[in-house]
């Protein structure tokens, strides 16, 4: 009897690219429009997102934390993320959003105490990196999402991948042509 297993079945890795006439600064303004981004009734769309809040606690010009509330069929999901940005000399940037995970328990405790918000993510780890650069005629946007799952989510790896693609497509629609 042969049993095949995939050691990476719980790791999801999706990349996408987008080209726009908008400047890197305009793309930046869209990516950080937290109060204007949600699933319904907001200027910018993000599937299942009820709200995302930028936190002042421990914030600097190049790094801050957010708290997100996402509607999910199984349960509402809440989580803290660390956001970092690195600008290049041509006005482009790399924007990284890292969901805090089990290795950040002390920080999660501090953020929960300071904000009164809970941290109950759906994924074990999640990291989205968006690189934006101007090539002289257009702005290129490259996005990579990598996350790991366990438990019930491992039963539907295709649905997880579809959800990542839906999220990425919404980001690219928000940025526009």
Image (spheres, rainbow, N blue to C red):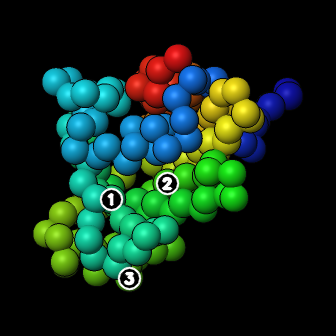
- Please provide percent x and percent y for residue 168: 51, 29
Q: Which mark is residue 97?
A: 2
Q: Secondary structure at mark 3?
A: helix
Q: Is residue 35 above or below residue 62?
A: above
Is residue 163 or residue 27 the one in the foreground? 27
Q: Which residue, given by chain and number where applicable, does mark 1 sit on? A: 66
Rendered residue at 40%/60% (across/down): 81
Cα distance between the residues tagged 1 and 3? 16 Å
Q: Residue drawn at (36%, 74%), measured in percent from left and top?
A: 59
Residue at far top of view? 177
Q: Residue at x 29, y 46 (%)?
A: 34
Q: Which residue is mark 3?
A: 106
- Are dots 1 and 3 in contact, CB under 8 Å? no
Cα–Cα gap, marks 2 and 1: 9 Å
Position above or below: 65 against 11: below
Using the rendered view, name the quadrant where residue 132 is placed.
top right
Tell whether label 1 touches label 2 (CB within 8 Å).
yes
Left or right: 116, with 82 as reference point: left
Q: Nearer the viewer, mark 2 or mark 3?
A: 2
Helix, strand or loop under label 2: strand
Q: CA distance from mark 2 to mark 3?
A: 19 Å
> Horizontal and vertical percent for residue 105?
40, 76
Q: Residues within 10 Å of mark 2 (few under 14, many from 20)?
A: many
As drawn, the label of residue 168 is none
Image x and y of residue 175, in percent: 46, 27
């Amino acid at each position: 009897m042969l049993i095949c297993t995939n050691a990476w079945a719980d790791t999801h890795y999706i990349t996408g690219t987008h080209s726009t006439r908008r400047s890197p600064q305009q793309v930046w303004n869209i990516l950080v429009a937290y109060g204007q981004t949600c699933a319904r009734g907001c200027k910018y769309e993000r599937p299942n997102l009820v709200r995302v809040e930028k936190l002042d606690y421990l914030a600097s010009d190049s790094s801050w934390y957010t708290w997100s509330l996402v509607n999910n069929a199984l349960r509402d999901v809440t989580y803290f993320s660390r956001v970092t940005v690195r600008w290049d000399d041509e006005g482009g940037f790399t924007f990284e959003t890292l969901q805090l995970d089990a290795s950040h328990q002390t920080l999660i405790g501090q953020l929960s105490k300071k904000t009164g918000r809970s941290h109950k993510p759906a994924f074990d780890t999640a990291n989205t990196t968006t690189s934006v650069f101007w090539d002289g005629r257009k702005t290129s946007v490259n996005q990579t999402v990598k996350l790991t799952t366990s438990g019930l989510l491992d039963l539907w790896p295709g649905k997880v991948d579809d959800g990542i693609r839906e999220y990425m497509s919404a980001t690219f629609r928000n940025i526009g042509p």
